[in-house]
Amino acid sequence: MKIKAHGKVNLALDILGVREDGKHDMDMVNAPVNLCDEIELEANDKGRDEIFCRNQQLPDSNTISKTLNLLRQHGLKKHYTIHLTKAIPEKAGLGGGSADAAALLWALDELEDLQLSLPQLEEIGFQIGADVPCCLHKGFVRVQGAGERVTDLEVDWSIPVVLVQGTQKISTAQAFANFDASEPRPLDIDIVQDAVRKRDIGLLYQTMTNAFEPQAFATIDELAQIKEDMQDAGLVRVMMTGSGSCLMGFSVDDEVLEDAVEILKQKYPFVWKGKIGL
């Protein structure tokens, strides 16, 4: 069985504080992108799981192992050999590991007829990672709490986008540490949700926001150059995709997007053109 694991972007991201359990209280508007990892899985009779990526076996700390182990508490019986083909870059803010876990949750629930509800899958997913509940959804969502509260915005919309990542990376832990040392300002997430629900691209461009950006740009000098290059290539509303070092830029003109990709590929290792919303 082969499945696709879609990455995600944050169209809005605010951090409201730190909860008593140590997790950050978030408010976000997220959406899937059609940039996908591919997971090939097959049941085996070895009595153990095998997980490979780039022909190397992965350690047990990966999100796929966590998914399998947690599902065994909910009726999963078989062991699996899994081959993961990565397309979503690491430390990019695109939720690659979370996307893999979410796709596997859906697939194994179907394969072994576990009959888990979406709330049950979200609860399991949240034990794997904060972005997993969001990645279980197929469209635009409002995400609150530490990632466990997800509300479908029920919007059928597709937004062209170009993603660019340079050589410098930001881990989620580093991004939160940088934010905690800063003086944050309150952000308006409701207006971004309204823009999505109205499918108002102009309003969305004006209101998209990411609380990680000020400290990330102060810490990673390459980000400012990437943003400038993307804007010079004709892209608008260039901003971070999440907590990582990938930037996204927009245009409603496909020719502008194509030209931008050709220009940016000459300088940066990861440049991708696709769409937000499935």
Image (tube, rainbow, N blue to C red):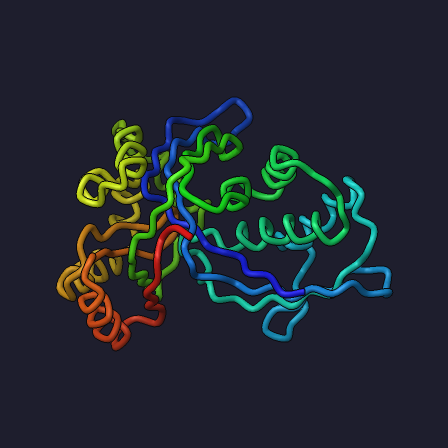
225 to the left or right of 1: left
How many marks can you see?
A: 0
**Placement of the N terminus among the 4 image quadrants:** bottom right
Q: Residue furthest top?
A: 20
Q: Is residue 215 left or right of residue 244?
A: left
Image coordinates for residue 84, horizontal then vertical, percent: 60, 66
- 119 or 89, which lies in front? 119
Residue at point 38% right, 47% down? 243
Quadrant of residue 175 in the image? top left
Residue 166 x/y as whole percent:
32, 65
Residue at the image point whose x is 46% and y is 60% from the top: 90
The residue at the far front in this view is: 156
Q: Residue at x 73, y 40 (%)?
A: 115
Residues 78 and 96: in front is: 78
* Residue 26 sits in quarter: top left
Horizontal and vertical percent for residue 212?
Answer: 32, 42
* Image position, residue 198 (x, y; %): 27, 36
Residue 267 drawn above or below residue 24: below
Q: At 81% from the left edge and 60% from the top edge, which residue is drawn?
A: 48
- In the picture provided, is 165 more to the left or to the right than 73? left
